[in-house]
Structures are given as structure tokens and as C-alpha cells.
Image (cartoon, helix red, strand yellow):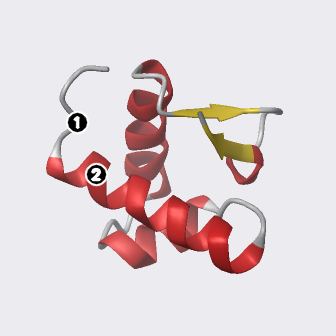
Amino acid sequence: MDHLSARQEAVLACIREWIAENGEGPTLREIGQAVGLSSPSSVAYQLGRLEEHGVIARSGRRWRSCRLA
């Protein structure tokens, strides 16, 4: 795995905590609120980068279906 940026680390931590508390992944807006990103497209970009790094994976098209790899 390549080095993750501070923003990507924050998004990953948010996903870990959300799954532990709720049993499923957060929405783009929920992640954005937690890490301080107002644009869902910015969150989607960060999630895409995490997926490229192999840290998360999606079982469907929706980001709520993401799981930790």
C-alpha cells in the first residue's frame, strides 16, 4: 500500500468508526460532515483514491456498500 494523505487517513478513520457503530458504510455526505469536506465529489475522489490503494472496496455502485479491505 502506498502512503495515504492526511485527508485519506481521516476518511478511512471515519469509515472504520462508522462501520463499527452502524454496521454499514457512511454516505458521502456523512463522511464529508465528519472530515470537513463540503462537496460530495471531493469525498468521492478521496474514496476513489482509497479504493485504488486497496484499502477499501465496494460491493456495489453505491459508496455506502464500501467495506474495509
Q: Is residue 67 above or below residue 35?
A: above
**Residue contact between numbered discs 1 and 2, judged by CB atoms under 8 Å:** yes
Q: Which mark is residue 42?
A: none
Check disc 1 and report the residue beneath it: 4
Write down the quadrant of residue 67 in the picture. Answer: top right
* Element marked by disc 1: loop
Q: Amino acid at mark 1?
A: Leu
Neighbour tally class for label 1: few under 14, some 14-19, many 20 plus, Cα within 10 Å: some
Mark 1 vs mark 2, CA separation in Å: 6 Å
Instruction: Decide which of 64, 39 is in the foreground and name it.
Output: 64
Q: Residue at x 23, y 53 (%)?
A: 7
Residue 26 percent across, percent down from the top left: 64, 65
Q: Is residue 41 above or below residue 50?
A: below
Mark sitting earlier along the chain (1/2): 1
Q: Is residue 55 left or right of residue 26?
A: left
Q: Residue at x 49, y 56 (%)?
A: 40
Check disc 2 and report the residue beneath it: 9
Residue 69 percent across, percent down from the top left: 59, 33
Neighbour tally class for label 2: few under 14, some 14-19, many 20 plus, Cα within 10 Å: some
Q: Is residue 36 left or right of residue 22?
A: left
Q: Amino acid at mark 2?
A: Glu
Q: Is residue 25 left or right of residue 29?
A: right
Q: Residue at x 47, y 40 (%)?
A: 47
